[in-house]
């Protein structure tokens, strides 16, 4: 059982830690560095680069979800069963759903907007529907990332509270 619990913590660390590093360190550094060096073109390149990093990270998230489902399922079957196992499994399901929405809805729609432009999104007038849509999609992506991190932290907290 200790091994399965270790796998649970490892999967949560990879998923939550990876998202935190991407959103809290990589994005600001990439955007600040490229924009300082290349202006608005650098900002556009940073967006493409970070989008690619986020897209590739989704595979890590899916692997972590698989490990979490396996760990919770085996722990429930073999005992001792974690408290509120169903809530934990539904939380992982919600985290996975947010990852899938990011990968298959938000990122492709952001790319569609970018492909239809001759320049950077930031150069569009603030009232341009494409810029507004881009802002909404970006906000949704950020919100899902934060929600996933909070769910993962909640799972880690629940794991730490278990007494075995």
Image (cartoon, rainbow, N blue to C red):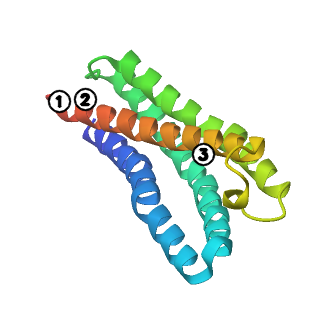
Marks 2/3: CA–CA distance: 30 Å
Q: Position of residue 20 (x, y in %)?
A: 39, 53
Question: Relative to 152, is 101 on the left or the right?
Answer: right
Question: Relative to 163, is 92 on the left or the right?
Answer: right
Q: State the SS at label 1.
A: helix
The residue most toward the bottom is 37
Question: Which mark identifies residue 138?
Answer: 3
Q: Residue at x 71, y 43 (%)?
A: 127
Badge 2 crowding class, 10 Å Cα cut-off, few under 14, some 14 to 19, many 20 or more, is some
Question: Which mark identifies residue 141?
Answer: none
Q: Residue at x 51, y 37 (%)?
A: 144
Q: Reply above or below: 104 against 53.
A: above
Question: Which mark identifies residue 158?
Answer: 2
Where is mark 1, residue-wise?
A: 161
Of 12 and 111, the residue lying toward us: 111
**3 vs 1, front mark:** 3
Q: Quadrant of residue 104?
A: top right
Quarter of the figure that contains the N terminus: top left
Q: Position of residue 108 (x, y in %)?
A: 75, 46
Q: Residue at x 62, y 80 (%)?
A: 38
Q: State the SS at label 2.
A: helix
Badge 1 crowding class, 10 Å Cα cut-off, few under 14, some 14 to 19, many 20 or more, is few
Are dots 2 and 1 in contact, CB under 8 Å?
yes
């Amino acid at each position: 059982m200790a091994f399965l619990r270790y796998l649970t913590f490892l999967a949560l660390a990879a998923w939550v830690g990876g998202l935190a590093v991407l959103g809290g360190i990589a994005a600001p550094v990439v955007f600040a560095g490229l924009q300082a060096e290349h202006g608005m073109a650098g900002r556009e390149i940073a967006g493409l680069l970070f989008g690619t990093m986020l897209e590739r990270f989704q595979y890590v998230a899916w692997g972590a979800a698989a490990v979490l489902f396996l760990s919770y399922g085996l722990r429930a079957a073999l005992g001792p069963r974690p408290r509120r196992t169903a809530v934990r499994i539904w939380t992982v399901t919600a985290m996975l759903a947010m990852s899938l929405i990011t990968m298959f809805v938000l990122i492709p729609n952001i790319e569609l907007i970018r492909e239809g432009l001759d320049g950077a999104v930031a150069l569009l007038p603030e009232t341009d529907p494409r810029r507004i849509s881009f802002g909404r999609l970006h906000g949704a992506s950020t919100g899902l990332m934060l929600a996933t991190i909070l769910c993962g932290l909640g799972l880690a907290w629940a794991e730490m509270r278990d007494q075995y």
